[in-house]
Image: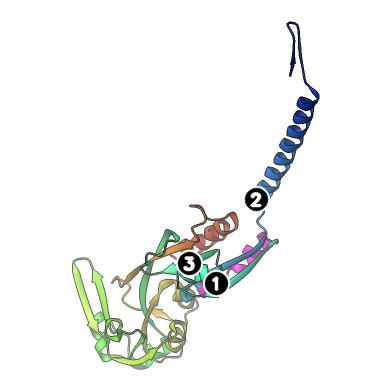
């Protein structure tokens, strides 16, 4: 500044500094405006990992979501591994079960209840069990684990009652959704996440058994990279969509 007892004025350097700052502020305002528009209208590719139990629930409802977000491209991967967030470059993972300490950001969004069910054709042929202990007289289908015994022992709670039934295993599958297909085909009685079978129950392909008993429960988490405590705008939008589906299923 040029200063005197009566006035102040910009020097040539000051005028240059002022004009440059004004240009920078105008550019900052334009950039913030673009960022706000991106937040309101997400665009680009969103890579989402889904536990297989969510495949039917999410993919069957994806059309309306994509209609509302025409600038968003969706890529899905069926996985329940938190390590896939970094290894596969996922923006978001819907994970079921206990989470290992991975350094990722996680938010608990739902509880998955285990539902025991069978096809109406199987029940018409073999009879419908009325009590969990009746399972010992039926064919059980289980998901394969290293410790198969734990998956062959089904627990049930009703009020103060707690029952653990060791079911007679007639089929073991490494594919959880393949297990559901076998249930639909009448192979036997199986236990699956409510999110995996709810639409099949609604379409009467499967029948829920022991509705007054509570089975195994598992937490559901949304997991994303630790690039900041908050999920990206497009991930948050998809997460809201997924949570609404789970709430509707519940």
The foreground one among 150 and 11 is 11
Which disc, if any, is residue 94? 3
Which disc, if any, is residue 88? 1
Answer few, some or many: residues within 10 Å of disc 3's Cα (few below 14, many 20 plus, some between 14 and 19): many
- Residue 132 falls in image quadrant: bottom left
Q: Which marked residue is nearer to the observer: mark 3 or mark 1?
A: 1
Distance in Å between CA atoms under marks 3 and 1: 14 Å
Q: Secondary structure at mark 3?
A: strand
Residue that appears at 63% across and 51% down:
39
> Along the polypeptide, which appears first: circle 3 or circle 1?
1
Which disc, if any, is residue 40? 2
Q: Secondary structure at mark 2?
A: helix
On the rendered image, what quadrant is the N terminus found in?
top right
The foreground one among 83 and 74 is 83
> Residue 84 in the image: x percent, y percent?
50, 71
State if disc 2 and disc 3 touch (CB < 8 Å).
no
Answer few, some or many: residues within 10 Å of disc 1's Cα (few below 14, many 20 plus, some between 14 and 19): few
Q: Is residue 131 visible?
A: no
> Residue 188 in the image: x percent, y percent?
37, 90
| Part of the protein shown in magenta | 55-69
Residue that appears at 51% across and 53% down:
228
The correct choice, above or below, for 6 with respect to 30 in the image is above
Identify the coloring: rainbow
Q: Main secondary structure of the magenta part?
A: helix
> Residue 17 in the image: x percent, y percent?
75, 30
Q: Is residue 244 left or right of residue 111?
A: right
Answer whether residue 62 is magenta in the image: yes
- Residue 28 falls in image quadrant: top right
The furthest residue to the top: 5
């Amino acid at each position: 500044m040029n200063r005197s007892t009566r006035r102040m004025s910009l020097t040539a350097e000051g005028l240059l500094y002022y004009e440059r700052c004004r240009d920078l502020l105008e550019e900052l305002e334009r950039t913030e405006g673009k960022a706000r528009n991106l937040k309101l209208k997400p665009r680009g590719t969103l890579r989402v990992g889904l536990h297989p139990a969510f495949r039917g629930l999410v993919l069957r409802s994806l059309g309306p979501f994509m209609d509302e977000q025409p600038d968003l491209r969706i890529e899905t991967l069926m996985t329940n591994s938190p390590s896939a967030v970094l290894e596969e470059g996922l923006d978001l993972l819907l994970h079921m079960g206990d989470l290992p300490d991975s350094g990722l950001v996680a938010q608990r969004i739902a509880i998955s209840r285990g539902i025991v069910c069978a096809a109406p054709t199987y029940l018409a042929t073999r009879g419908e069990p009325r009590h969990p202990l009746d399972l010992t007289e039926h064919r059980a289908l289980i998901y394969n684990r290293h410790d198969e015994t734990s998956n062959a022992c089904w627990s049930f709670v009703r009020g103060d009652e707690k029952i653990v039934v060791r079911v007679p295993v007639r089929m073991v599958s490494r594919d959880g959704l393949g297990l559901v297909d076998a249930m639909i085909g009448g192979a036997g009685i199986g236990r699956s996440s409510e999110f995996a079978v709810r639409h099949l129950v609604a379409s009467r392909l499967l029948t829920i058994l022991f509705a007054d008993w509570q089975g195994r429960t598992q937490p559901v988490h949304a997991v994303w990279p630790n690039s900041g405590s908050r999920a990206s705008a497009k991930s948050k939008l998809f997460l809201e969509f997924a949570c609404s589906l789970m709430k509707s299923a519940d």
